[in-house]
């Protein structure tokens, strides 16, 4: 059994990840802290550091948070870009940058990206771009992490549980059930792989 910090636990992706973490002690966190053990804002370095210091011993961080703005490229403002970059890209990179100081030897980080960098759709340029950045980040930073620490990204297509929200934006896509995406998080946390992007597509 590992101590796993799950960030974004009450979200749709967090609930999917949770299905793959049943053999572990899961410590939950989110921005509001509602229904979770801890409050954390992944866009705030101090908040991230406070979470890791308060939790103490942990073997894995699973992040399912990455807020994205959706608009056509020609209408996207710099502010919308920065909001997305500071959450889905830098927020996740900062979790690893700061978290590697605190995580146990041979611990693991699992980040979230999303299939739109492979299968683009209208209005999702910021999500696609930052998902691509996260996929690249895990592949490359895996070579640099100390103490046997591993890192992977889960890159899922749309969840069945989110189809009512995103289905109209995604003609020709087939959603996947949350428990299948949970298996990808399980493979990252319980396996020995590192520097991988684990795709879950239909
Ligand atoms: N849903 C899908 O089908 C799907 C598919 C592929 C990829 N993804 C990716 O998965 C990620 C999560 O999507 P989702 O559908 O799970 O969203 P969601 O249901 O809206 O949940 C978002 C979660 O993130 C937390 N959160 C937001 N901003 C935060 C911050 N700054 N610091 C800490 N926690 C924060 C929220 O916490 P509070 O409620 O406490 O604010 C909530 O728990 C996104 O990057 C999305 O692109 C989603």
Image (cartoon, helix red, strand yellow):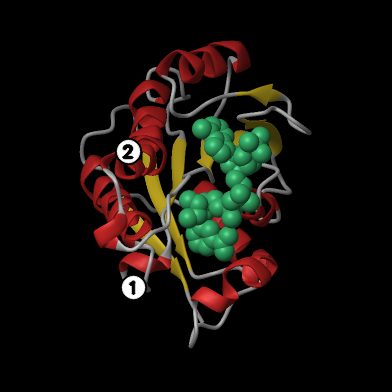
Answer left or right for 106 relative to 89: right
12 over 33 or under it: above or below: below
Q: Residue furthest right?
A: 35
Q: Residues within 10 Å of mark 2 (few under 14, many from 20)?
A: few
Q: Is mark 2 within 8 Å of ligand 1?
A: no
Quadrant where the N terminus is found in the figure: top right
Circle nearer the viewer, 1 or 2:
2
Compared to residue 166, the image places residue 97 above or below, namely: above
In the shown orientation, is residue 15 left or right of residue 101? right
In the image, what residue occupies the spot 48% across and 44% down?
67
- Position of residue 49 relative to residue 1, above or below, is above
- Residue that mark 1 sits on: 120
The secondary element bearing badge 2 is classed as: helix
Task: From the image, tell me which residue sits under label 2.
Answer: 79
Q: Quadrant of residue 55?
A: top right
Specify the farthest residue to the front.
75
Q: Dot 1, crowdedness within 10 Å: few (<14), some or many (≥20)?
A: some
Instruction: Please say if the residues under marks 1 and 2 sit with CB atoms less than 8 Å apart.
Output: no
Q: Is residue 149 visible?
A: no
**Residue 123: percent from left, percent from top:** 38, 65
Q: Whole-Å distance between the Cαs marked 1 and 2?
A: 22 Å
Front position in the image: 149 or 8: 8
Q: Position of residue 18 (x, y in %)?
A: 68, 49
Q: Where is residue 79? Give x, y as percent.
A: 32, 38
Name the disc covering residue 136, or none.
none
Nearer the N terminus, badge 1 or badge 2? 2
């Amino acid at each position: 059994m590992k101590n796993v910090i799950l960030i974004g636990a009450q979200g749709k992706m967090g609930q999917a990840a949770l299905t793959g973490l049943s053999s572990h002690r899961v410590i939950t966190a989110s921005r509001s802290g509602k229904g979770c053990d801890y409050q954390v804002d992944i866009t705030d370095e101090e908040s991230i550091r406070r979470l890791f210091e308060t939790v103490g011993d942990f073997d894995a961080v699973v992040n399912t948070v990455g807020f994205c703005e959706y608009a056509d490229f020609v209408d996207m403002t710099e502010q919308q870009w920065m909001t997305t970059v500071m959450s889905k890209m830098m927020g996740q990179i900062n979790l690893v940058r700061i978290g590697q100081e605190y995580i146990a030897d041979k611990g693991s980080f699992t980040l979230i990206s999303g299939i739109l960098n492979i299968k683009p759709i209208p209005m999702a340029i910021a999500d696609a771009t930052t998902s691509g950045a996260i996929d690249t980040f895990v592949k490359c930073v895996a070579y640099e992490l100390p103490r046997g620490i591993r890192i992977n990204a889960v890159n899922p297509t749309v969840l069945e549980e989110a189809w009512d929200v995103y289905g109209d934006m995604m003609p020709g896509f087939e959603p996947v059930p949350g428990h299948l995406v949970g298996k990808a998080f399980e493979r990252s946390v319980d396996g020995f792989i590192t520097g991988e992007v684990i795709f879950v597509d239909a």
